[in-house]
Image: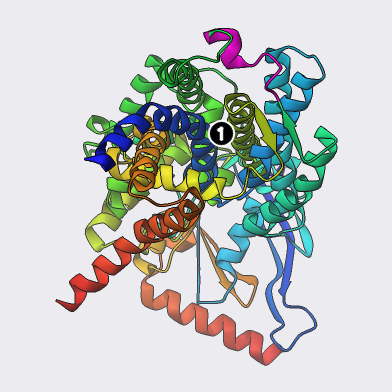
């Protein structure tokens, strides 16, 4: 499959938490999908459906019981998270998690600009780096390019999340993972970060997997919609199918699929 | 008046002592502040550095190789603590306690006895400042040059690609992994650096007092911590340069307080109690203050 070779291949992800105890919970029950290069897929689903677990499994943060993750034809399933970071980057739900608070904005960017490269005793910040970081921050329109020597701890949640987004895309990754990255922000900041996301992802044509709880967002953006339920992908809509949807449709589709499955089981 | 005169006479010695302990304070600051990983190994790596340096000087080695191997031994102690912490998932505090306990035996093995006198051997101070080992003020000047070299190197390293990465890992490990950093590697390197500095302090102390003793590490961590906290209160820690200078400035000031306490009639054996109380106050003050404010 040439398409799989070039993009992202996720197959048969399985994960059970606390196996063999009363708290046993199957979080992933055979999650499989492929993403074409440049595809922007949005993942929705109720709480506990396995969305974040899927992302954590793909990033290597969570060890799997079974399954395969391959990026551009290379199997990364056995690599630890920090090795996979060479080909994929992440933005977390909590704005505090994506940046190093005690470092300055430019120092954070310097760390991410060398993601996947070997680090050495060379200076972490050269003139060319600063120019490149300034240009990347200007895209946000938040004025962060004039505060590059400020400590990140001084920034608001929205600013930190925007910075994390720039850090995740400064070297175009083969896969960008966005885990409800606007959910913890106030509506205005959330809109800013969504717009920045669409702009950077679109401009660089980055293959993206984004989790959201916001139905409007899920319908309005992206090339593809994946709905998860009880550790499986239960609905997979392409751009054309998605275009015809409203939030109400989506909710009723969800109930249809879930009740069908209950009947079948 | 008597008290003031006593203190005045103690100033040069207390400056020199403060400068010796400034190395340890730097070595304590790295895990506590840059790595956010409290580590007690200094209590063992400080006498380890002293023991290795003293044993090598007594065996006829030169000053430079003796100090170099002391520093390398300290690095190794830091690596052992880090590896115990990372592989066996033991908290860094407990890993450090295990290592410093084991080092007590190691240090006696290194020297072949619980202590080594260096009065008849050439040391850093006799070599640089004359056969009498120099006056306290010239000793302080020599140590200040050494400290400036160490600080400059640390400041340079923390701005390299590797140094930035180490600080990032200390600030946020999840972010570090997401940016491709092997967090274990940087924790090991950081604790190794801390071990180097504590052992350098020990090697310097052994030569300063012409004497290495297996018990000389007792309380050294709290002294280093007191210096770091005091320096941060004076300089702040918002900029990296201030964070690096804080343990040094703090250590110098701390030994001024020690000198004052001694001139007030406290016994040297009271100092550990006073230091502990000082650190307790410094740690407790912000909490008590916020509690007090919320009540008002």
x then y, percent, for residue A230: 62, 78
Q: Magenta span has B291?
A: no
Asked which quadrant contains residue B51, the reply is top right
Seen in the picture, residue B148 relative to A47 is either above or below; the reply is above
Nearest to the observer: residue B37 or residue B126: B126
Q: Does the magenta stretch include residue B128?
A: yes
The quarter of the picture where the N terminus of chain B appears is: top left
In the image, is residue A116 above or below residue B230? above
Query: Residue A150, how many percent across, how many down?
Result: 28, 36
| Residue shown at 35% from the left, 60% from the top | B281
Which quarter shows the C terminus of chain B? bottom left
Which residue is labeled 1 in the image? Answer: A115
The residue positioned farthest toward the bottom in the image shown: A263
Instruction: Give the residue furthest to the front.
Output: B2
In the rendered structure, the answer to whether residue B142 lies left or right of residue B79 reads left
Q: Say if residue A202 shows up in the picture.
A: no
Q: Which of B52 and A203 is in front in this view?
A: B52
Q: Give the range drawn in magenta.
A: B118-129
Q: In which quarter of the image is residue B196?
A: top right
Q: Which residue is drawn at 72% across and 19% down?
A: B66
Q: Where is residue B8 in the image (x, y as percent from the top left)?
A: 29, 32
At horizontal 61% and vertical 50% (from top left) the residue drawn is B40
Left or right, B42 with reference to A16: left
């Amino acid at each position: 499959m040439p398409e799989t070779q070039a993009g992202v291949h996720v197959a048969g992800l399985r994960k059970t938490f606390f196996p063999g105890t009363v708290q046993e919970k199957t979080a992933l029950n055979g999650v499989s999908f492929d993403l074409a290069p440049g595809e922007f897929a949005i993942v929705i689903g109720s709480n506990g459906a396995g969305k974040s677990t899927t992302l954590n499994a793909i990033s290597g943060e969570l060890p799997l019981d079974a399954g395969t993750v391959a990026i551009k034809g290379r199997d990364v399933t056995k690599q630890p998270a920090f090795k996979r970071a060479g080909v994929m980057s992440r933005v977390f739900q909590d704005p505090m998690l994506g940046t190093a608070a005690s470092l300055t904005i430019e120092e954070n960017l310097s760390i991410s600009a060398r993601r996947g490269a070997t680090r050495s005793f060379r200076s972490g910040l050269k003139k060319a780096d600063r120019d490149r970081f300034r240009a990347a921050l200007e895209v946000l329109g938040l004025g962060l390019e004039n505060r590059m020597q400020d400590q990140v701890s001084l920034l608001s949640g929205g600013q930190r999340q925007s910075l994390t987004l720039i850090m995740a895309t400064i070297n175009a990754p083969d896969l960008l993972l966005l885990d409800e990255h606007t959910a913890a922000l106030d509506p205005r900041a959330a809109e800013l970060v969504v717009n920045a996301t669409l702009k950077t992802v679109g401009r660089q044509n980055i293959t993206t997997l984004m989790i959201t709880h916001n139905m409007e967002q899920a319908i309005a953006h992206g090339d593809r919609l994946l709905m998860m339920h009880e550790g499986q992908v239960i609905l997979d809509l392409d751009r054309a199918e998605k275009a015809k949807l409203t939030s109400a449709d989506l909710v009723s589709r969800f109930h249809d699929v879930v009740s069908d499955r209950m009947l079948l089981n | 008046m008597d008290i003031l005169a006593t203190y005045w006479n103690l100033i040069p010695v207390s400056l020199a002592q403060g400068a010796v302990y400034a190395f340890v304070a730097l070595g304590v600051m790295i895990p506590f502040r840059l790595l956010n990983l409290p580590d007690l190994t200094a209590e063992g790596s400080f006498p380890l550095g002293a023991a290795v340096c003293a044993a090598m000087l007594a065996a006829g080695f030169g000053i430079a190789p003796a100090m170099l191997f002391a520093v390398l031994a300290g690095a190794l102690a830091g690596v052992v603590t880090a590896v115990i912490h990372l592989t066996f998932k033991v908290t860094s505090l407990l890993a450090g306690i295990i290592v410093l306990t084991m080092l007590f035996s190691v240090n006696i093995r290194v020297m072949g006895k619980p202590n080594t006198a260096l009065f008849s051997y050439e040391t850093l101070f006799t070599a640089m400042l004359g056969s009498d080992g120099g006056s306290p003020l010239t000793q302080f000047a020599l140590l200040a040059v050494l400290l400036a070299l160490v600080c400059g190197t640390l400041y340079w390293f923390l701005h390299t690609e590797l140094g930035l990465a180490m600080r990032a890992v200390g600030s946020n490990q999840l972010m570090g992994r997401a940016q491709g950093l092997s967090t274990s590697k940087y924790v090991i390197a950081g604790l190794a650096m801390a071990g180097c500095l504590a052992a350098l302090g020990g090697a310097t102390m052994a030569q300063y007092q012409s004497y290495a003793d297996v018990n000389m590490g007792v309380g050294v961590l709290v002294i280093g911590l007191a210096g770091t906290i005091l320096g941060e209160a004076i300089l702040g820690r918002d900029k990296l340069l201030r964070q690096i200078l804080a343990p040094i400035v703090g250590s110098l000031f701390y030994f001024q307080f020690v000198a004052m306490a001694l001139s007030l009639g406290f016994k040297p054996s009271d100092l550990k109690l006073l230091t502990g109380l000082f650190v307790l106050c410094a740690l407790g003050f912000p909490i008590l203050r916020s509690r007090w404010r919320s009540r008002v």
